[in-house]
Image (cartoon, rainbow, N blue to C red):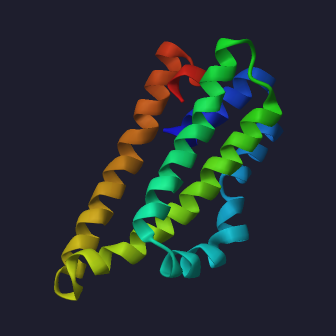
Amino acid sequence: MSTVVIPILVFQRTGSAAQTGVVTALRVVPYLLVGLIAGPLADRVDRRGLIVWGNLAQGASMAVIPVADAFGAVPLPLIYVASFASATAFVFSDAAVFGALPALIGPARLPTANGYLTSIQSVALMLGPALGGLLATTIGPANAI
């Protein structure tokens, strides 16, 4: 959802395609900056903790936007920081998920589990943006976040 809603929010607030592109890029940059660190770190620490803390960090960084919106217009730098922080937290938790799966289910069931995960991700990639667009239209993009 945030992949669609955050750019809508930025464009709504700024009217700038360039600013919208910047916030979209900020959601990809963490893969380049910390992607190579996240995998080895996930192998060396408690994966469950990394997943939980990563998800909490994602939620907290995104929650800042509707809270700030409740007190007035959300400043663009806040949207940038929240988007970057959320994406960075996701990179770490995602690395931990991929490392945890084989340990949880064993190598014999790994192909089936990967198939299920891929299916779930595909459904989320289809429904998430649609739901995000619907919510952004009905309750506003800041509240949809």
Residue 44 shows up from this direction: yes
Q: Residue at x 77, y 34 (%)?
A: 78
Picture layout, residue 97 above or below residue 27 = below
Q: Residue at x 51, y 46 (%)?
A: 56
Q: Residue at x 81, y 38 (%)?
A: 19
Residue 143, image x, y percentages: 54, 20
Between 42 and 26, which is closer to the camera in this rendering? 42
Residue 67, image x, y percentages: 63, 21
Q: Is residue 110 left or right of residue 15?
A: left
Which quarter of the figure has residue 76? top right
Q: Is residue 101 left or right of residue 25?
A: left
Residue 127, image x, y percentages: 36, 40
Between 130 and 84, which is closer to the camera in this rendering? 84
Picture layout, residue 22 above or below residue 29 = above
Residue 139, image x, y percentages: 50, 14
Q: Residue at x 40, y 64 (%)?
A: 48
